């Protein structure tokens, strides 16, 4: 798939998945996209776990506790921690966000569906997921992505018109 096609096609998927397992080779390539992402001062603060075992994916989905996610045969988790770079700032939020977007595009490219689940797992659920996966205490599960082949069309959300958000050669100057 062309990169711009993946960018245009990507949508959060929160519906039923087919039970077909996601091959390890696909998960590996998706995580290759993740580790290729930029990071502040190249600190590479994000860690990743791919889950190919449908039983384990189901356990994670039970913690998240949404019916659509329970059908996901696989999952990807992003782990992060605050890590000051050489001048003191921590760019860990930006780092894992950049990696997450690379993952979403690679997932779209391969014909899978997923959603960036962050706000809904923050705190106790993230801790439980980390415990289940043996994540060291200094790292936090920051994003959970249930993953699989979509059984339905993604709904998609309304985006603001480009001319209200993006301009050429100055604020408010339309393309
Ligand atoms: C920082 C961040 C946190 C998010 N957390 C959640 C979440 O907890 N649950 C969820 O269903 N979607 C979550 N999303 C997905 C957004 O709801 C979604 O990207 C947005 O509605 C736009 O839809 P689209 O992804 O189809 O373009 C999150 C996205 C971002 C960037």
Image (cartoon, rainbow, N blue to C red):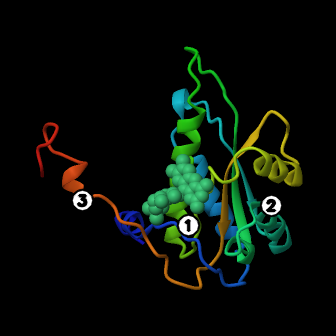
- Calculate the distance from the C-alpha at mark 2 to the C-alpha at mark 3: 37 Å
54 and 1: which is toward the camera: 54
Q: Helix, strand or loop at disc 3?
A: loop
Q: Which of the two discs, 3 and 1, labels the residue nearer the N terminus? A: 1
Can you tell which mark lies on residue 107?
1
Across and down, in percent, residue 31 comes to: 64, 56
Q: Helix, strand or loop at disc 2?
A: helix
Q: Which of the two discs, 2 and 1, labels the residue nearer the N terminus? A: 2
In this view, the mark in front (2 or 1): 2
Residue shown at the point (71%, 64%) measured from the top left? 75
- Calculate the distance from the C-alpha at mark 2 to the C-alpha at mark 1: 23 Å
For the N terminus, which image quadrant? bottom left
Can you tell which mark lies on residue 161?
3
Q: Is residue 30 above or below residue 167?
A: below
Residue shown at the point (51%, 45%) measured from the top left? 98
Q: Is residue 32 visible?
A: no
Quarter of the figure with residue 32: bottom right
Across and down, in percent, residue 41 comes to: 53, 27
Residue pointed to by mark 2 = 63
């Amino acid at each position: 798939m062309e990169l711009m096609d993946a960018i245009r096609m990507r949508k959060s998927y929160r519906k039923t998945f087919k039970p077909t397992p996601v091959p390890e080779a696909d998960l590996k390539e998706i995580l290759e996209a993740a580790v290729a992402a930029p990071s502040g001062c190249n600190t590479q603060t994000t860690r990743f776990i791919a889950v190919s075992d449908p039983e384990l994916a189901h356990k994670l989905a039970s913690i998240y506790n949404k019916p659509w996610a329970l059908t996901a045969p696989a999952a990807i988790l992003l782990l992060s921690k605050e890590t000051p770079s050489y001048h003191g700032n921590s760019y860990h939020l930006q780092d894992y966000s950049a990696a997450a977007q690379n993952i979403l595009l690679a997932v779209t490219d391969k014909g899978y569906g997923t959603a960036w689940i962050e706000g809904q797992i923050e705190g106790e659920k993230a801790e439980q997921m980390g415990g289940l996966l043996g994540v060291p205490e200094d790292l936090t599960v920051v994003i959970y992505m249930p993953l699989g082949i979509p059984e339905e069309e993604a709904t998609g959300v309304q985006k603001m018109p480009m001319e209200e958000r993006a301009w050429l050669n100055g604020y408010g100057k339309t393309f």
